[in-house]
Image: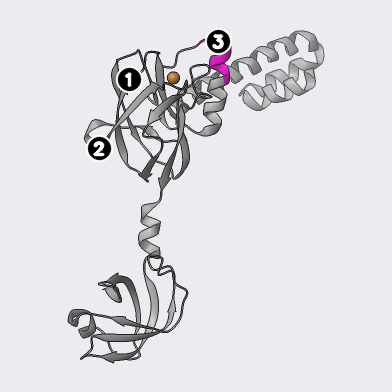
Amino acid sequence: MKYLLLTTALALTLSAPAFAAGSHSGEHGDAKADDHAVEHAAMMKDDDHVEDHAAMMMVGMPGTAKDVARTLDVTMRETDDGAMIFEPTSFEFELGETIRFKIRNDGELEHEFVLDTVEQNIVHKAMMAEYDMEHDDPNSIRLDAGAVGEVIWTFANAGTFEFACLIPGHYESGMHGPINVGDHMAQTVVEYSTGKVKKIDNKAGKVTIVHVHGPLVNLDMPSMTMVFRADEQIVAKLSEGQDIEFVADRVKGKLTVTKLR
Ligand SMILES: [Cu+2]
């Protein structure tokens, strides 16, 4: 055990030769000094971790007012049948979006609004059950009955997160909901399908495209040979045999090429 601690201390200190020299003659005393070195190193590491945690979390980071893209009203209250709820019950955001949550406690009890991962909410909930602690971090706000407040938050990571009230018993009574942060840029990229122009019918404004590949996500169709409508401007850019990247959509009920690149 002592040897293990000594090894760790050596790895962390610049005065390694001095420790190594002393360890033969006065093993006991040196080992104690090393214990301190290790403890101190561990404490320093914890402090750093806390600072990182405050600035950037999985759920994102504190936002600034000038970046706010949307302001959303959130209410917290108890219901007649004994539940405790947030309204709305879920959120959808785009990656990088900064949201101003205007939160109102319409209930008769104290409530809080905390943004975090599901896992971290579980951890903090357990801590609150044990210590009756009160959070005061940028990702949360606690409000007395009738009070209003706001949290400005930037959702910097894609994924599924959670808003919750971690006051003992409240989460279990219904005070939590999912936050989905999507990667909109990725969706824009996959919108385009590829294919080869087989036939153009100028008069009818029709284009036959073969080897249609890619998602055509908005139409939910597999790749195949398909006939599309296209307006004059689109048709003018097409020639038979041409490989194209395009977006198709339903226009007046007909599959229509709406974008080319
Ligand atoms: Cu609550």
Q: Residue 131 carries which label?
A: 3
Q: Which mark is residue 115?
A: none
Give percent across and percent down for residue 165. 45, 23
Residue type at the position of mark 1: Asp
Q: Residue at label 1?
A: 106
Confirm whether residue 137 shows in the render.
no
Residue 45 position by quadrant:
top right
Q: How far apart are marks 3 and 2 (CA)?
A: 36 Å
Which quarter of the rendering shows the C terminus? bottom left
Give percent across and percent down for residue 132. 52, 10
Residue shown at 54%/21% (left/top)? Answer: 125
Residue type at the position of mark 2: Asp
Residue shown at 79%/12% (left/top)? Answer: 27
Q: How far apart are marks 3 and 1 (CA)?
A: 26 Å
Residue placed most toward the observer, 129 or 127 = 129
Residue 79 versus residue 118 in the image, above or below = above
Dot 3 alpha-carbon crowd within 10 angstroms: few under 14, some 14 to 19, many 20 or more:
few
Q: Nearer the viewer, mark 3 or mark 2?
A: 3
Residue shown at 56%/14% (left/top)? Answer: 129
The majority secondary structure of the magenta stretch comes to helix
Residue 149 position by quadrant:
top left
Q: Residue at label 2?
A: 67
- The span shown in magenta is 126-132
